[in-house]
Image: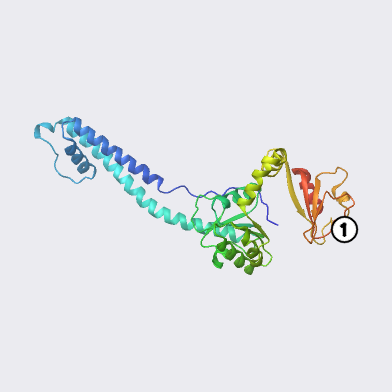
Amino acid sequence: MVKISPRRRWRFPDDPWQRVRVGVGLLATITLVGVIGYWLLGLALFDALYQTIITVTTVGFEEFGEPDEIDTAYRVFTLGLAIFGVSGALYTLGVMVEALVEGSLNDGFRVRREQRMIDKMSNHLIVVGAGRVGRAIVDYVGRHGADVVVVDRRDLHEADHPMVQGEATDDETLRRAGVERASTLIAALDSDADNVYVTLSARAVNPRLHIVARTNDQANEPKFFHAGANRVVNPSEIGGSRMGALAMHPTLAEFLDEVIHDESHGVTVDEISVRDGEAAEGRLLGDVIGESGQPLVIAIRDHNHGYIPNPTPTQVVTAGSVLVVLGADEHIARLRTEIE
């Protein structure tokens, strides 16, 4: 079972080059003001640009222009431009050096901090691939409070969850994501071949891992099961089925969408596993639920993965079974406590 923890959002440092962009913009503004100022004082545009550059850079050449044009106003403007120009240039140079150092340091600190977070996790969920499908998965499980580690070859420093950058087909990358301690891995890469390879690698490292794999071709499904996947999902097929359901059974489809995806109404569908030695083992379902009859148990999956729809109160709850329940969040939480 995926570990559920209080909801939190991981935030990483802002872009260290933001101040550089501000500095460059400031320097460009000062240069523009200088050119316009010298042009108004009588210099040609190129001469105005030349005088502005040598003033801002403190090169120290003599003033440009005819002697009779270099009056008090000319020198006052040059004095002000020198003060502001040099200040702007020094600021821009300083923040560039700072960004170069800080950016590298922040990247190193962030990677080490994330790795320490991951090293402390157990029973977490690993999402391999942060494309469109992967991001949707992370968003869903994150909203439900799961501890998530994202694996992708890109450096997604803006990610809301700890991540490992690297090739997921490399065993070392999966180990850095804590695959030995994880409860679930979702292989959501774009390539079926890569997802099969990730499934093989993850299964070899953690035989107890629950693996959900993405496929783009339903004909490849047997290969995933041979590789060790527990479930295989074709996003295109699910999307088409959902659209068909909205066309054929709009009310039912909308109700299920709201129950599963909308958290605002406080009603949800969930599953509760019954393990060996837990309080519910061997008891009648009616006794476990109680007189309130809430939450509603709409199905039971036995240890052989067979389903008993709409079970009666006299159904015996056995170890290894999973109750599929519908009801208010507080009722489901109470039942989970009773069973576990």
- Residue 217 percent coordinates (x, y): 60, 58
Q: Is residue 193 visible?
A: yes
Q: Is residue 214 visible?
A: no
- Is residue 196 placed above or below 12 in the rendered structure? below
Q: Quadrant of residue 330?
A: top right
Q: Which residue is mark 1?
A: 282
Q: Is residue 48 left or right of residue 187?
A: left
Residue under the point 48% across and 49% down: 13
Q: Residue furthest right?
A: 314
Q: Secondary structure at mark 1?
A: loop
Q: Is residue 63 left or right of residue 305?
A: left
- Residue 75 percent coordinates (x, y): 18, 34
Q: Nearer the viewer, residue 3 or 194?
A: 194
Residue under the point 54% across and 52% down: 131
- Residue 127 percent coordinates (x, y): 59, 56
Q: Where's the C terminus, which quadrant?
A: bottom right
Q: Which amino acid lies under the numbered mark 1 shown in the image of this protein?
A: Gly
Q: Residue furthest left?
A: 67
Q: Where's the N terminus, which quadrant?
A: bottom right
